[in-house]
Every structure is written in C-alpha cells, then in structure tokens.
Image: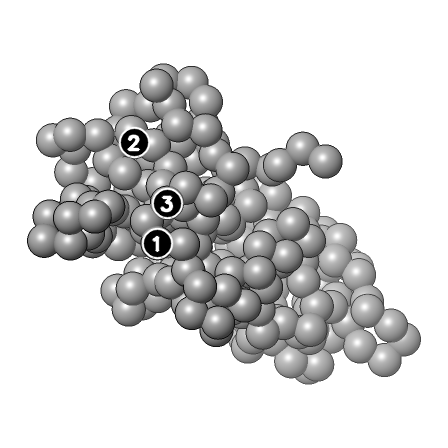
Amino acid sequence: METRRDNYVRVLDLKEVSKGNAPFKTIPAVQVIGEEYYTLLEVAPKDNVKLEVNERVYIGDEKRDKVDHIVRRITYNDLTNSAKNALIEVISQIVINREKYFIQFMNTISPLNVRMHSLETFPGIGKKLTSEIINERNIKPFDDFKDLQKRVKSVGDISVHIAEKIVEELKGESTHYFFIDSENRGNVAREQTRTERGRREGYGDRSGYRRNR
C-alpha cells in the first residue's frame, strides 16, 4: 500500500540536536505536523533559513524552498514541551484553513451505535451538545463554522474541539479514530514500543520520506 505523505506541514518548535558521533556539535531540527495526515516529523531546514512556529512549509517531492530533508518520523512523546503546548493552536489553524472539509465532516459524521454518536467522543462535546448539533444539521446542513456556532450557541470554538480530538488521537489515547489513519496509528504504537524499550534509533531517517537532492 502506498505511503500517505503530507506535502505541507506546520512548524511546532525549533530545537538543536547532536550531530552523529560529534555530541558537542549541534545542528538545527524542526518539529512539524502534517496538514492532511497529521504526521509528526523532524525536518532539517536549509542553511540560513529561519522558520517560525505555525509557519506553513512545503516538504513534498518537488523543489523545497526551506526544508533540506526530512530527518525522521516522531511520535507525540518525542515532541518538546514547547511543541506540545503549540499543538492545539497550530492544529486549530489547520482546521480553520480546511474549513470546507471539516464542515462537511460535521454535517455527515454518523453514530457509533444506537446509544452513542461519534461526536460524543470529542473533547468538550457531550451528549447534550451532540443532540443540539444533530438537530440543527437535520433542519439544514451547516454552511461553515460561523453558521454552526451561531445556531448552536453553546458549542464554542469548533476548531478547538476538533484540534483537541486530533491531539488525543496523536497521543494514542482514543477509543475511536477519525483523523489519524491506521498506518499512522501503527507507527505511533511501534515508536512508543521502541521508546519504552529504550531502543530509539536517534537522529536517523526512519520515516520513509525521500531526501530532496
């Protein structure tokens, strides 16, 4: 099966890591999250390139302006504290920028079973709020986030609810997954096992992404 790859990522944090067998020499590394598949990666910026948190950066197979290569795939546990703190805000921005996709998601997400709706698994959305959302969308599908928040006044910022659910999935703490696909969930599990056993491979490429030469 073809590996799903993000063409664009958002910057979470900038840090420095030891270079190979020279522990006293450091090189820059940037922790990022993919805009479509929410893959967590460390990338190496090109020389003299300075990136900012939440900056949108291209990492696809065509010519890259700011990223030299993808270093490795990482998991939530590999993120710096600063990257973890930035996750909700950065993912919320991704959700807002992909509003058309996510409003369609809110208009079509279905029940899990006869007793529970999928929306009830989202942080901050309980049974009562789910009922309000479903009742309103049955009257008329939501046009956009503003329309949803106007008609379901107690929902708050829907982009934050979605971002919190994605973070929960990145942590591997969800019972139901909607945004992190099975391949990425497998990677999360494998990487967490390596971490628990103390067998990380260090600053080497294990992501399957190609270096851009």
Cα gap from disc 1 to disc 2, whole angstroms: 20 Å
Is the Cβ of the residue at disc 1 closer than 8 Å to that at disc 3? yes
For label 1, the SS is loop
Residue type, numbered disc 2: Val
On screen, residue 71 above or below 88: above
The front one of 92 and 51 is 51
- Image coordinates of residue 46 in percent, x first then y, are 21, 30
User: Which residue is at a point 9% across and 53% down the rendered structure image?
Assistant: 24
Does label 1 or label 2 sit earlier along the sequence? 2
Is the Cβ of the residue at disc 1 closer than 8 Å to that at disc 2? no
For label 2, the SS is strand
User: Which residue is at a point 45% across and 48% down the rendered structure image?
Assistant: 73
Q: Which mark is residue 67?
A: 2
- Mark 3 neighbour density, 10 Å: few (under 14) some (14–19) many (20 or more): few
- Image coordinates of residue 80 in percent, x first then y, are 29, 64
- Mark 2 neighbour density, 10 Å: few (under 14) some (14–19) many (20 or more): many
Residue named by callout 1: 202
Cα gap from disc 1 to disc 3, whole angstroms: 6 Å
- Mark 1 neighbour density, 10 Å: few (under 14) some (14–19) many (20 or more): few
User: Which residue is at a point 45% across and 29% down the rendered structure image?
Assistant: 210
Cα gap from disc 3 to disc 2, whole angstroms: 16 Å
Q: Is residue 17 left or right of residue 145?
A: left
User: Which residue is at a point 72% across and 64% down the rendered structure image?
Assistant: 136
Residue type, numbered disc 3: Gly
Residue named by callout 3: 204
- Quarter holding residue 176: bottom right
The front one of 213 and 149 is 213
Does label 3 or label 2 sit earlier along the sequence? 2
Residue type, numbered disc 1: Gly
Residue that lies at the very extreme toward the front in this rendered image = 21
For label 3, the SS is loop
Q: Quadrant of the N terminus?
A: top right
